[in-house]
Amino acid sequence: MKNRIFFIVGVSILSLFLSYNILAQEKTYFDSPFGVGGGFVASWTFPNIQPVNDQLKAFGTPELGKSGYFSSGGAGFVYIGFVPGLRIGGIGFGGTTKETGLSKGFRRQSKLTSAFGGVSVEYTLPFIRRAGVSIGVILGGGNTTLEFYRYKDSYSWNYLWNEIKDSSSTTNFGRKLSNDYFVVAPTLNIDIPFYRLVAFRLGATYAIHFGDNWQMEDGQDVFNVPSGTAKNQLYLSAGIFFGFFSY
């Protein structure tokens, strides 16, 4: 999923640079916010996974993402020129939070991995100068996985095959659930140019997920997952962009 997201973002950024070369002669660029570029974005992510954390108290690990977790990725944009202040772009990023614990002689691990990407459409407020303050939305898709493991410190090849025989009980345990979904994410970004060739970004994104089809690692559906599990995440981000920027 991550590889597909970054491939889409890469193609989007390339297309935006080609569009810029075609439109670069428009004089209106200098009468309104103008810029084209791409770069790195890092975010501190706050997941909404209380239904999971309620169960982890009995499982034996701390709550996942209780104080947020780190996500990273890339983004790019270009002002389209014929609509002053409007820019389009692409973005994709993801991150992981993991907790471990020791309970009743077993090491236990819980893990959340989330990634999403899409096309961004933003409008830069024209009455603010020297910085680009933009509001907009990201439309795209994403994936979230939840993993849970319980195991002893030592493990052998023979023990693996004893575990999967129907006649043998197991003490080790592993499960992986995943959810694919559409994303609609309102955004607020502030881009501060430095010598017009570099811009620093501060921003906030709230990713709203549409899709409740959870599956096991083999594609088997998981029913009765509580509504809102690992959905609708807040991202507070910072980044650095390279290109040309004029506000």
Image (spheres, rainbow, N blue to C red):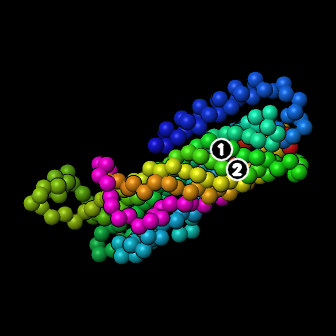
Classified by dominant secondary structure, the portion drawn in magenta counts as: loop
In the picture, residue 19 is in which quadrant?
top right
* Residue with the mark numbered 2: 136
- Of 222 and 71, nearer the camera is 222
Q: Height in image: 194 above or below 170?
A: above
**What's under tag 2, amino acid-wise?**
Gly
Which residue appears at 17% of the width and 55% of the height? 164
Tell me if residue 51 can be seen: yes
Query: Bounds of the magenta span?
Result: 217-237
In which quadrant of the rendered image does the C terminus lie?
A: top right
Is 238 on the left-hand or right-hand side of 227?
A: right
Residue at the far left: name it. Answer: 167
Query: Is 224 a magenta residue?
Result: yes
Report whether 54 appears left or right of 121: left
Pointers 1 and 2 in contact (CB under 8 A)?
yes
Identify the residue at image location x=20%, y=51%.
157
Check disc 1 and report the residue beneath it: 120
Crowd around label 2: few <14 · some 14–19 · many ≥20 (10 Å): some
The residue most toward the front is: 83
Q: Amino acid at mark 1?
A: Ser
- As for residue 216 lying within the magenta part, the answer is no
- The residue sitting at 49% across, 38% down in the picture is 4
Percent of width and height locating residue 25: 84, 25
Q: Secondary structure at mark 1?
A: strand
Q: Quadrant of residue 8?
A: top right
Q: Position of residue 44 (x, y in %)?
A: 61, 59
Residue drawn at the location 31% of the way across and 48% of the way down: 219
